[in-house]
Image (cartoon, rainbow, N blue to C red):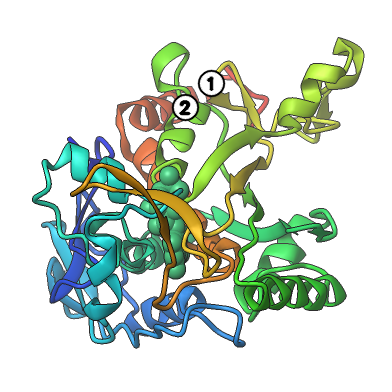
Amino acid sequence: MNNTFGRTVTLTLFGESHGPEIGCVIDGLRPGLRVDEEAIAYRLSLRRPAGGIGTARIEPDPFRIVSGVYQGRTTGTPLCILIPNTQARSADYVNLSSTPRPGHADYTGRVKYKGYADPRGGGHFSGRLTAPLVAAGAIILAALAERGVRIGTHVARCGAIADRPFGDLAADLTALDDAAFPALDAAQAEAMRAAILAAAQDGDSVGGVLETAVIGLPAGLGAPWFDTAEGLLAHALFSIPAIKGVEFGDGFALAAMRGSQANDAFRMEGSRIVTETNHNGGINGGITNGMPLLFRTAVKPTPSIAAPQKSVNLSTGTDTVIQIGGRHDPCIVPRASVVQDSVTALVLLDLLEDGDGQILRRAQNDNAGTGRDTCSTV
Ligand SMILES: Cc1cc2nc3c(=O)[nH]c(=O)nc-3n(C[C@H](O)[C@H](O)[C@H](O)COP(=O)(O)O)c2cc1C
């Protein structure tokens, strides 16, 4: 379905940037999961523009959970989160109704929805809809944490500025949990901020790369061919507006390696099977191998820039020049990091909860004490 993702744990997203409310419905959550509204508010604050480098539209996101939670725990029935839009300024978009913004979804949205879609603020295509994704993500991340699974994303690159690579993953993920700007190196974070401000001053925007690490994941999630762990993650990651590339492990760099460099040698660590390196990002044959999951996304520069751009007038069928006003992020990358955590969490909880996960858990129980599979990869 167009606006629903997942099989066992599903998320349906709805709303428009300038409509009264946006929100989501999560279905398939186990009953009894703790729902911490402060944690949701905190994750939403990480998505909010901050430090003078984001859009001037700052939404306070006073979310409401209107179903699926009773006395601070999930009931197991559909959980609906609503977030009002309080800071919309639709007049900024009047001249855009007939002139599509290059790089944005104004033209394709008009074609798909035959001119009936709400164009204000990008309508249903707006990055604003990532707020309910993040609210849902806070609940799902907590459910994963109860199972020992942790997720974190840093800005690996912003424009020409690179962050340091992941090192001690547990420590890095803890640092990212509290980071005002999601970079591992404070000096590089400052340089990134400066690059974003410089682009904004030029009436322009910058893109970057987001890198995610997941630890504590068992081996055995995902399936070959059409439901690979990479495929399901890529599907969800590409739903984040402005993401244009995804690579797992060393990704495209693997193409230039020899097999002897690209292969991750196995070894025993106590009773666990581990790999000495992780060039494959924790996935072999579409199935998690118990090593940390590592992947990167390419985030394009924000399409709405102040500089004049060529476009067309859809009413007259003539070429024109568009000058975009309104409030826009000169860089999406830092705000999208918590969104990336959230969609990753959704995919992984769905994988852990679906039939494949049940088979995995059953196999582990069946094998307990039988001597089979004595090497644990979990
Ligand atoms: C958190 C977030 C904030 C965004 N803010 C803006 C914005 O202020 N202005 C803009 O033009 N695009 C913004 N975008 C990106 C557009 O929504 C996106 O480029 C557009 O929908 C077209 O989709 P595509 O880039 O995936 O093709 C944002 C995206 C995200 C994830």
325 relative to 342, above or below = below
Q: Position of residue 112 (x, y in %)?
A: 18, 37
Marking on residue 286: 1
Q: Is residue 343 visible?
A: no
45 relative to 216, above or below = below
Q: Residues within 10 Å of mark 1 (few under 14, many from 20)?
A: many
Please state if 204 lies on the left or on the right of 355 as rendered.
right
Mark 2 or mark 1, which is nearer to you? 2
Q: Secondary structure at mark 2?
A: helix
Callout 2 amino acid: Gly
Please state if 251 lies on the left or on the right of 338 as rendered.
right
Callout 1 amino acid: Gly
- Locate the C terminus by quadrant: top right
23 relative to 41, above or below = above
Using the numbered discs, state the Cα–Cα distance from disc 2 to disc 1 in whole angstroms: 8 Å
Instruction: Name the one closer to the observer, 89 or 220.
Output: 89
CB-based contact (under 8 Å), mark 2 and mark 1? yes
Asked whether mark 1 and ligand 1 are closer than 8 Å, the reply comes as: no
Instruction: Name the one closer to the observer, 363 or 138.
Output: 138
Q: Position of residue 168 (x, y in %)?
A: 81, 57
Q: Residue at x 32, y 81 (%)?
A: 37
- Locate the N terminus by quadrant: top left
Q: Is residue 52 visible?
A: yes
Marking on residue 179: none
Sequence-wise, the earlier of marks 2 and 1 is 2
252 relative to 96, above or below = above
Classify residue 126 by image quadrant. bottom left
Q: Residue at x 41, y 60 (%)?
A: 322
Find disc 2 in the rendering and name its residue. 231
Q: Position of residue 81 (x, y in %)?
A: 20, 69
